[in-house]
Amino acid sequence: MQHKELPRIIVAIDGYSSSGKSTMARRLASAVGYRYIDSGAMYRAVALYALENGMVSDSGDVDEAALVAALPRIAIDFEFRPDGSQHTLLNGRDVETEIRQLRVSSIVSPVAAIAAVRHDLVAKQQALGTARGIVMDGRDIGTTVFPDAELKIFVDASAETRAQRRFREMMEKGNAVSYADVLANVVHRDEVDRTRKESPLRRADDAIALDNSEMTIDEQDAWLLEQFNRTINSL
Ligand code: DC
């Protein structure tokens, strides 16, 4: 019997910061043999560039005009390792570890609110999707980057649950941070992401909502795989 070739789809996973969407996205991609792309890493790399090039004041204000003028000099690429991990390259340099630091998290939301930055990065993300067979996570993947994605998920969890997750993750990586600072950062980023003018964080009308506050990672994986299989079978 001849098997029908399975269609390769685009899976868009959006949601609040530290909602566990990247874990979900990465694990689904690995389970189904797709490429996982963390779009937030691109905004983080641009934020790191701004920090390293004197475009952020001591009080955390970003020099928007200088950053927009520098955009043509900022190359962001991904290196995909055979183990499925993604390494973000800023002008050829592996910045995967640095972009996860709190100093970057603290200024990334205002950077991601700049229209010219978004236009640039959305175009790059769309180019990465032309091969299909990808799982991309972010804030505007289902609304702006891939409005025609076959499967869209919108993940949420309480701010406290998300701050706990981020705090644990940072402690495990040896970053000395306080839970209070992490929670404040999560709440603040939610607010900036939700209220910005340019493609604010919101659930696409056709996205499936998931509150994973009380779910284990295994339960989450099983739920997502079920959505994936249902989508593939409906095409
Ligand atoms: O998912 P993350 O925490 O790594 O995202 C970093 C920042 O980038 C976050 O403040 C929101 C922003 N972002 C965005 O505006 N659009 C995306 N598609 C992904 C991230």
Image (cartoon, rainbow, N blue to C red):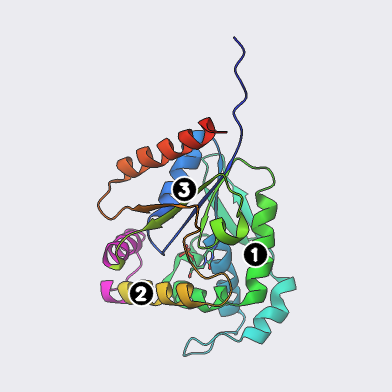
Q: CA distance from mark 2 to mark 1?
A: 24 Å
Residue drawn at x 27%, y 67% as measured from the top left: 160
Query: Which corner quadrant of the image does residue 87 belong to?
Result: bottom right
Q: Which residue is mark 1?
A: 121
Residue drawn at x 31%, y 52% as measured from the top left: 212
The answer to whether residue 177 is seen in the rendering is no
Disc on the earlier residue, 2 or 3: 3
Q: Which residue is mark 2?
A: 187
- Mark 1 near ligand 1 (CB under 8 Å)? yes
- Magenta residues (range): 160-181
In the image: residue 121, left or right of residue 30: right
Please, which residue is most extreme toward the front here? Answer: 205
- Mark 2 near ligand 1 (CB under 8 Å)? no
In the image: residue 84, left or right of residue 125: left
The quadrant in which the N terminus is found is top right
Place of residue 189 in the rendered image (x, y in percent of width and height, measured from the top left): 42, 74
Disc on the earlier residue, 1 or 3: 3
Alpha-carbon neighbours of circle 2 within 10 Å: few (<14), some, or many (≥20)? some
Q: Amino acid at mark 3?
A: Ala
Q: Which residue is mark 3?
A: 25
Q: Amino acid at mark 1?
A: Leu
